[in-house]
Every structure is written in structure tokens, then in C-alpha cells.
Image (cartoon, rainbow, N blue to C red):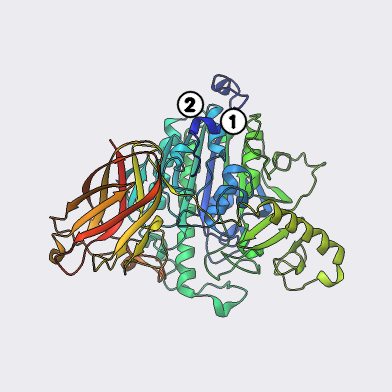
């Protein structure tokens, strides 16, 4: 059985700086902007003439610019590294969906450290490290959360979102909406130290963006192409460039708000991306894209502005990565902590402030499934054992392993050591159930369940999918769950049902308890989303507006079991479509 720890107990070693002393020390505010699937080359400051990103460019010029900054090959792993200061393979994160994106409950996050030190904390955007409490951002150190917890979303214009674990309807284009909420939070907390985390979900697909940004690129033929131009899809590139210019506009709005409130001087603003670009487009001749653990999949832009401490136009040639952000920010704030677990990152404050004479280089690890790549200050050993001098060969075109056997042996030893350290965590089977009852309302989306008897997801990618094709009473939907608190739970299914299927009786069963209800109302909305795509969404699902139906109450004890949704009676041609089941503790 999965052991779950009360959130209060996760802070094994409390910060030595109390909230009372936080205001006295004038802690710096922190604004962290994380983009989704934006490559190193998707900014004009990197030399890309295909687009213009003046606000982000100015941010970089006014602070420090990392030339060699590394993250993971995919979204959830990078978030785990930023939040914990630990390589993601240590943290319980194994993938990007079906529960593999969850950050282990015995990991302590940057937000928790900062909150203990007196910061107001909030996140606005894509979380992607767990949905159900105590994996939810509100349980991981964030006072306020507004966004979605899945790896991607099926529609970007006023979609259904999560506000502090309650379903709400968004207001306008998501990136604009997240920015609006972030600026409101900043203004509300202008007199106290705050941590405002803004993880945008663009330019991740679906490739949707308002006309005012897309029109510039609708017929464009970008001059700068991917190193393998035959792989580039022009329509995808156009949409991505438009989405990046929208991000730039929104970054400008946040920076302007800081200026208006006279907060810019003592606010640390960090801007970076979570992995390489989500398509083959210009990326500085680097090999690979999102999903790759080569340079193109893991090297991203990173800029840090802090006028009180960082000189303008600071260029940093040392390697750094997402694992360094937690210790760096705590160091910049003067917050001394005993880490809950050993971290892999290190404070790069000396690099930011120019005191780097004694800086010692260290390797950065990249992991994908069973593959491991190692990046040192000068070189990369890829997962196949090929060695490249990245400073002279960023495109990884010349394998120099044959003439550098000692270096290969040394870097391979680093990879082998790390593989051994995570053998029983990252490489082991993920047997964690989905947690129920650690707050009043627990969502169990289709992403986390399994269909049986012909029931299938609405698309291959699980994150924003729903269950469909439920034709017979042999069909059922199941979730592996663990109830953390005994009590009475109302089971609510979010469904669609055409007129001919009204009268179907749906039952929920868990831990020997059953309850059922008959669908009496037609709810048969059209799916939508793809009609607003600028480029084909591929394996991602369209969306629908689902209707809640109470199935009644389950009286549950603590324990692990299978939540099963079944159809006791199907009078028509089929049953229902299912977006999620909520178990709401009374």
C-alpha cells in the first residue's frame, strides 16, 4: 500500500528564516516564467530573424543570459527538476501522463521552502506534476493555483480550468488569461515578498493563437529553416512563431506591471523553457528536438533579471540547468535550509553576480527511458557512446570518441553511476495508485483510468481525452485508487448521452460499496477545438462540455481498490461518454 504523508510533515527541516524576519530582510520577489515546447532558437535575441520578441530580448539584456542552460527532454521531468533541485529520475516522475508525471510526496518543492520563509505563493498555468491531492499544486506549497494539471489541454480559448481544485471556465486565450491572473496576484501582494510561477502552456499544441498574432505569419515563408529543411512543416512553424510572439507580448505585460508598482528593482525574473522545440524549425544547428536527449532537445534559453544584484548584459558561459534554480533562488533570498533530500543542483548566484572565480564544473545528466546522456562544460557523451565537443560542434556532427577514450570512460562512469542510483526508482514499475480523500473533492479524469470491453479514449494522447465507444454492458471504466480518509463520498460522473441512450443506468463500485443512477437528461454536445487549430493537432483529443450526474453516495473505508464504472442497463444503442468521475467527501 502506498504510504502517504501529511503535507505538514513533508517539511522535515524547516527553513531557518521565519515569516517574521522575512519582511525585515526585504526578500526579493520572484517571478518565474516557464514556456512549453519553446526551443532555444524561438527568440529573436538568439539570432532568429523569423520572429520578433522585443520584450524577452530586453529582459535578457537587462540581466544575465545563460549560453548553456539545460532542462529535460519533456515537460513534467523539467518541472520536477525545477521544483526539487533533483534530477527527475529520482523524484518519481517517469513520463508525462497516466500518473507517471506525479512528483513523489516525500519530495519538497521550491514553493514549500519559500512559503515557509514568508512568501505568498501562486502558480498560473500548466502544473503537470500531479492532479489529485496531495499531488495538487495547492498541496505542494502554492497558496493559489489557476490552470490545468494535465500535460496538455485540448482548447485554448476560455477552456475549463482548475482554480484551487474547483472547476471554472477560463476567460479568453489561455496565455493572456494566465498573465491576467498573475498580474492580479502581483498587485495584491505588492507589499509582501511573493513567488509568482507562470508556467505557460504554449507553444505546445494544439496550435491555437489569436488572429492578431497569427495574421503576420499566415502566408510567411520563414527565411531561417531547420538544419534538415525537408523535415520542417511550414504550417507548424508559422503557428509556433505566432504563439511565441504572443508569449513575448504577455511577458511585456508582466514586466510593465512590475515597473508600474515600483517592484522591478528587487524582483528576480526568470525566463526559460521546459524542453526543445515541438517541431523541426530553426534551432541554431543543434541536433534533435523535443523528446531527444541531444543538445536540441535539452538546451533552452534562460534569462535572469534582478536589477538590485545582476548587472545588465551579463553573459554566462558555464553550464547550468533547471536543477540549479531551487538552490539559486534560496541563495539569492538568503534563505538557509537543510534540504529534505540531497539535491543535484547548485546555486549559480556566483555566476549571476560575477563572483565565479572558484566555480567548479560538474556534469549534467539527461535521461530518457533507459538512455542516459552526460553533458560536461565542453562535451556531450550521447546515449550510444558517441562523444562530441559541443563548444566546437554544437550540431554533434563529428564523433571524437575514438581519439578521446579516457574522456569517454570518465563520462560513461558518470552515466553508469547514475543508472545504479535510480535503478530501484526510475527504472522500477510505477505502482502508485491515484489518491482519494486528501481533500474534499477528488477528480479522476479519463487520462488516469482504463477502458475495457471496447471502450476507448477519444484520442491516442491521454491527457485531455474522454472515454467513448461504450456499446454494451460488458464495457467498464476503472481507476486504481487509494482512499486516504474514511467517510461518505458522493460519486459524480461527467458525461454526455444522446437522446437514444437516455435511460442507461450507470453504477460506481469501490471497496465493496456500490451506488447507481439512471441518466434521465439528454446531453449530446458537439466536440470542438480542431476548427480553431492553425495546424493539425495529430493525436490530441478534441474537447466537449460534459454534464455532471450524481450516482449517489459510497461509504468508504481507508484502503486501496479499483473504482469501477459500469452500465447495469443499456436500453438504447450504447451507454455514455465519460470525461471524469469526482469523489466528493461529504
Q: Is the residue 320 above or below the residue 456 in the image?
A: above
489 shown above or below 288 = above
Question: Relative to residue 403, is residue 275 depicted above or below?
Answer: above
- In this orientation, does residue 169 appear? no
Q: Marks 1 and 2: in contact by CB < 8 Å?
A: no
- Left or right of residue 494: residue 262: right
Task: Report the residue that reaches farthest toward the bottom.
Answer: 230
Q: x, y (%) of residue 250? A: 45, 49
Callout 1 environment at 10 Å: few (<14), some (14 to 19), or many (20+)?
few
Q: Quadrant of residue 373?
A: bottom right
Q: Position of residue 213 (x, y in %)?
A: 41, 61
Front position among marks 2 and 1 = 1
Residue 214 horizontal/vertical position (percent): 41, 64
Which of these two is toward me, 286 or 224? 286
Find numbered disc 1 in the image and state the secondary structure of the residue it sits on: loop
The residue that mark 1 highlights is 12
Q: Secondary structure at mark 2?
A: loop
Q: How many marks?
A: 2
Give the image location of residue 120, x and y in percent.
Answer: 48, 31
> Where is mark 2, residue-wise?
191
Does the rendering let one see residue 23? yes
**Which sits in the foreground, 65 or 518?**
518
Whichever of callouts 2 and 1 sits on the residue coming sooner in the sequence is 1
Quarter assignment of residue 380 = bottom right
Amino acid at each position: 500500500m502506498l504510504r502517504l504523508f501529511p503535507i505538514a510533515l513533508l517539511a522535515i527541516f524547516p527553513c531557518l528564516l521565519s515569516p517574521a524576519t522575512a519582511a525585515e530582510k526585504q526578500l526579493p520577489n520572484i517571478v518565474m516564467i516557464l514556456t512549453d515546447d519553446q526551443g532555444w532558437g524561438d527568440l529573436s535575441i538568439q539570432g532568429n530573424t523569423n520572429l520578433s520578441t522585443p520584450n524577452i530580448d530586453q529582459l535578457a539584456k537587462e540581466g544575465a543570459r545563460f549560453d548553456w542552460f539545460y532542462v529535460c527532454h519533456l515537460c513534467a521531468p523539467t518541472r520536477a527538476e525545477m521544483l526539487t533541485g533533483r534530477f527527475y529520475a529520482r523524484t518519481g516522475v517517469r513520463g508525462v501522463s497516466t500518473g507517471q508525471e506525479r512528483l513523489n510526496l516525500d519530495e519538497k518543492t521550491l514553493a514549500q521552502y519559500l512559503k515557509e520563509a514568508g512568501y505568498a505563493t501562486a502558480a498560473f498555468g500548466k502544473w503537470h506534476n500531479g492532479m489529485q491531492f496531495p499531488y495538487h499544486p495547492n498541496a505542494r506549497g502554492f497558496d493559489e493555483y489557476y490552470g490545468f494539471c494535465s500535460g496538455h489541454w485540448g482548447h485554448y480559448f476560455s477552456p475549463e480550468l482548475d482554480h484551487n481544485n474547483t472547476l471554472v471556465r477560463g476567460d479568453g486565450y489561455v496565455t493572456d488569461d494566465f498573465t491576467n491572473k498573475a498580474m492580479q496576484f502581483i498587485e495584491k501582494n505588492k507589499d509582501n515578498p511573493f513567488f509568482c510561477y507562470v508556467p505557460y502552456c504554449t507553444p505546445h499544441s494544439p496550435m491555437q493563437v489569436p488572429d492578431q498574432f497569427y495574421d503576420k505569419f499566415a502566408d510567411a515563408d520563414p527565411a531561417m529553416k531547420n538544419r534538415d529543411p525537408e523535415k520542417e512543416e511550414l504550417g507548424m512553424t508559422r503557428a509556433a512563431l505566432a504563439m511565441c510572439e504572443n508569449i513575448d507580448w504577455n511577458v511585456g505585460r508582466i514586466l510593465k506591471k512590475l515597473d508600474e508598482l515600483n517592484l522591478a528593482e528587487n524582483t528576480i525574473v526568470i525566463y526559460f523553457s521546459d524542453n526543445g522545440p515541438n517541431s523541426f524549425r530553426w534551432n541554431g544547428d543543434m541536433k534533435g528536438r523535443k523528446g531527444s536527449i541531444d543538445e536540441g532537445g535539452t538546451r533552452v534559453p534562460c534569462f535572469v533579471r534582478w536589477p538590485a544584484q545582476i548587472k545588465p548584459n551579463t553573459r554566462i558561459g558555464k553550464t547550468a540547468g533547471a536543477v540549479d534554480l531551487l538552490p539559486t533562488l534560496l541563495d539569492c533570498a538568503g534563505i538557509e535550509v537543510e534540504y529534505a533530500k540531497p539535491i543535484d543542483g547548485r546555486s549559480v548566484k556566483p555566476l549571476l553576480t560575477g563572483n565565479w572565480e572558484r566555480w567548479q564544473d560538474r556534469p549534467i545528466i539527461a535521461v530518457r527511458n533507459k538512455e542516459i546522456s552526460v553533458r560536461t562544460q565542453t562535451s556531450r557523451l550521447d546515449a550510444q557512446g558517441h562523444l562530441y565537443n559541443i563548444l566546437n560542434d554544437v550540431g554533434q556532427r563529428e564523433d571524437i570518441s575514438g581519439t578521446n577514450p579516457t574522456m569517454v570512460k570518465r563520462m560513461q562512469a558518470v552515466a553508469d553511476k547514475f543508472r545504479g542510483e535510480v535503478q530501484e526508482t526510475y527504472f522500477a514499475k510505477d505502482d502508485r495508485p491515484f489518491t482519494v480523500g486528501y481533500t474534499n473533492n477528488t477528480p479522476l479524469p479519463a487520462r488516469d483510468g482504463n477502458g475495457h470491453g471496447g471502450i476507448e479514449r477519444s484520442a491516442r494522447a491521454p491527457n485531455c481525452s474522454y472515454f467513448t465507444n461504450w456499446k454494451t454492458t460488458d464495457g467498464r471504466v476503472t481507476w486504481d485508487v487509494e482512499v486516504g480518509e474514511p467517510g461518505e463520498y458522493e460519486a459524480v460522473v461527467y458525461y454526455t448521452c444522446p437522446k437514444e441512450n437516455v435511460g442507461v443506468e450507470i453504477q460506481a463500485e469501490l471497496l465493496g460499496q456500490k451506488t447507481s443512477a439512471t441518466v434521465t437528461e439528454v446531453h449530446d454536445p458537439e466536440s470542438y477545438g480542431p476548427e480553431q487549430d492553425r495546424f493539425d493537432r495529430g493525436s490530441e483529443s478534441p474537447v466537449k462540455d460534459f454534464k455532471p450526474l450524481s450516482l449517489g453516495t459510497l461509504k468508504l473505508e481507508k484502503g486501496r481498490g479499483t473504482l469501477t464504472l459500469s452500465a447495469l442497463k443499456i436500453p438504447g444503442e450504447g451507454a455514455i461518454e465519460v470525461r471524469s468521475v469526482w469523489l466528493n467527501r461529504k
